[in-house]
Image: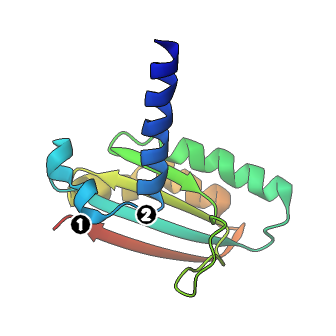
Amino acid sequence: MKKELNRRIFIERSAKGMAGAGLVAASSCSTEKSGLGKLFVHHVYFWLKDPSDQEARARFEKAARELVTVETIVDSHIGVPASTNRDVIDTSYTYSILSTYRSKEDQDIYQTHPKHLKFIAECQDLWVKVVVYDSVSI
């Protein structure tokens, strides 16, 4: 039983990681299959001013973990560049935060949520560049 439970946890975590990194084919990530319907996906990439500053990294990570507790977030992933190397992959960023919402309206709530505003206020001095990609299910 324990071996089966460990296997299930491994499969769940692997699937979440691949989905968060955008590596799972769109057909296998269908929100209709999961029962969630159409999703709003918000993916933010951050370039820290000094990526080697461990204190800044710890501050960013702590704030990011608090940020993804906003109630309207369905699921989230906080990540760093994977060790992949192909011409089409941009690994120049320091962190990414992926969050999913049930609707644009839920994401709009997130944008003005006190936790989101606090994250910006506490961390904006750490980054030199931020790029956002928003998408909706088709």
- N-term mark: 1 or 2: 2
Tell me whether circle 1 and circle 2 mark residues in contact (CB < 8 Å). Answer: no
Q: Quadrant of the C terminus?
A: bottom left
> Dot 1: what SS?
strand
Residue at x 76% of width, y 49% of height: 58
Measured from the top left, where is residue 38 in percent x and y?
16, 56
Residue 24 lies, with reference to residue 127, above or below; the image says above
Give the residue type at disc 1. Answer: Val
Which quarter of the figure has residue 75? Answer: top left
Indicate the secondary structure of the residue bearing disc 2: loop
Q: Residues within 10 Å of mark 1 (few under 14, many from 20)?
A: some
47 in relation to 118, above or below = below
Where is residue 26? Give x, y as percent: 27, 64
Q: Is residue 112 left or right of residue 65?
A: left
Q: Which residue is mark 2?
A: 23
Tally of numbered tags: 2
Outermost residue on the top side: it is 1
Q: Which residue is mark 1?
A: 136
Mark 2 residue crowding within 10 angstroms, few (<14) / some (14–19) / many (20+): few
Q: Residue at 81% x, 71% y: name it.
A: 50
Lateral position of residue 130 relative to residue 57, left or right = left
Query: Which residue is pictured at 66% across the width and 78% down the height?
Result: 92
Location of residue 107 with respect to 66 vertically, above or below: below
Q: Is residue 109 visible?
A: no
Q: What amino acid is at disc 2? A: Leu
Q: Position of residue 73 (x, y in %)?
A: 36, 46
